[in-house]
Image: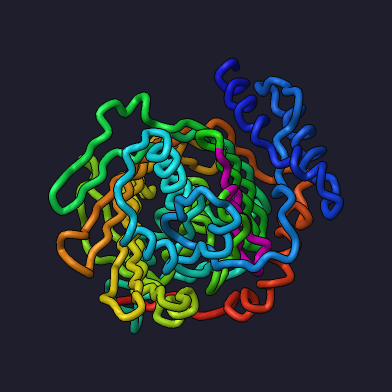
Amino acid sequence: MERKQGFFSVVRGLSPSRSRSKSPARSASPMSGLLRRRRNNVSHHVSQPDPLIFRSGSLRPAEALSPLKEGPDPDGTDAGESRMEGRWAQWMKGQLARAPSVSTSTCKRSDLRLLLGVLGAPLAPVHVSALDPFPLLSIKDTPIETSSAQYILQQYTAASGGQKLQNSIHNAYAMGRVRMIASEFETANKVTKNRNSSKAAESGGFVLWQMNPDMWYVELALGGSKVHAGCNGKLVWRHTPWLGAHAAKGPVRPLRRALQGLDPRTTASMFTNARCIGEKKINGEDCFILKLCADPATLKARSEGPAEIIRHVLFGYFSQKTGLLVHMEDSHLTRIQNNGGDAVYWETTINSFLEDYRPVEGIMIAHSGRSVVTLFRFGDTAMSHTRTRMEEAWAIEEVAFNVPGLSMDCFIPPAEIRLASISEACEFSQGPRVKTM
């Protein structure tokens, strides 16, 4: 009980309710009363002075929006300047010219922004919808790789609680703890490792809300900073303290964290058009491998200016013994074309291991896990190649389904994002999904 209370006190101090109360453009959050009722209904939960607040904080009106970046954020100190120039190309150019900093506080701040930028709210490769029917197993006129993948997903759905039970879920809530660290930085002639990982790691927590169809909201607090992101079914957005608000380009996509053992229905839908490419042992357990690739139209829609997303691939490793997803590998490659210079490539790979599956109201949920991230920069000259390794460990403390009182109003994005980006997001919300390779 004391452990949960300590976590809530951390998130409570970072709640956006404090900043929202100062904004005349924002009304009181509808999540406030909902969370009070939720806490009173959970017998093992201690009452807290203030509830977790769901909605995003007040944002400056009439700001120019940059697209949501699925990678590192700028590490400059001026928030206004970063917001205006915080595009991928600007960040990359800064990295090309930036000399290594020897300041411990600057490095710590840079590491925190890097961790939150990459691990705070990454998205899945393709668009899927809770309204899409789950395909029937088909063998006739179907490639063996595709029919095998369909069979594996049928087993996964059954092992996760069954399709009937999953279809009865209209919304979901999860709360957990996280620890993150930038553990290693490698250049052409030097490797720097974080020797004291226990002290260098940043601790925090997150809350995740989901609702059909295709709505979600996540708030992650870490090391005194907070990232919150959401989707109202038509557009995806993210907000950080140093960059402000960003709208995602391309089709609406699920939150990757939900695929990490928290949402089996969306996970199964994500791999619907995948191929089975073989088998592999993960932690001594035999697994089937499903491969999913974002199609060229989706990649083009997500690209912007000099930043071109070349590929985004997702691998799912499903246990042959339990049928559950135990490992997920996510990799995407971005090409940055500098003005008059050579192209620079950034490859981000996230390996997640899902552990401690336990039933919650009949649905199998992974209650802990860890991720290892590699951020690799290459392409201009060999001496400028860099590799950064980051790690995350998480534990789920509470999960609930069909929470009373949760409504569409709880997923309304900030006003300036609604006005600036809704037309673009709607254009791709039902766009192409997957091309198998």
Residue 156, compared with residue 21, is above or below; it is: below
Q: Percent from the top left, x then y, of residue 55?
A: 72, 48
Residue at 35% from the left image edge and 58% from the top image edge: 95
**Quadrant location of the C terminus in the rendered image:** bottom left
Residue at 35% from the left image edge and 25% from the top image edge: 198
Given residues 154 and 97, the one toward you in this image is 97
Is residue 273 visible from the viewing direction of this image? Answer: yes
Given residues 341 and 373, the one toward you in this image is 341
Magenta stretch holds residue 150: no
Residue 132, compared with residue 389, is above or below; it is: below
Q: 334 left or right of 240?
A: left
Residue at 33% from the left image edge and 43% from the top image edge: 101
Q: In which quarter of the image is residue 19?
A: top right
Residue 284, compared with residue 139, is above or below; it is: above
Given residues 7 and 201, the one toward you in this image is 201
Q: Give the range drawn in magenta.
A: 225-241
**Quadrant location of the N terminus in the rendered image:** top right
Magenta stretch holds residue 232: yes
Q: In which quarter of the image is residue 420?
A: bottom right
Q: Percent from the top left, x then y, of residue 84?
A: 57, 64
Q: Is the magenta stretch mostly helix, strand or loop?
A: strand
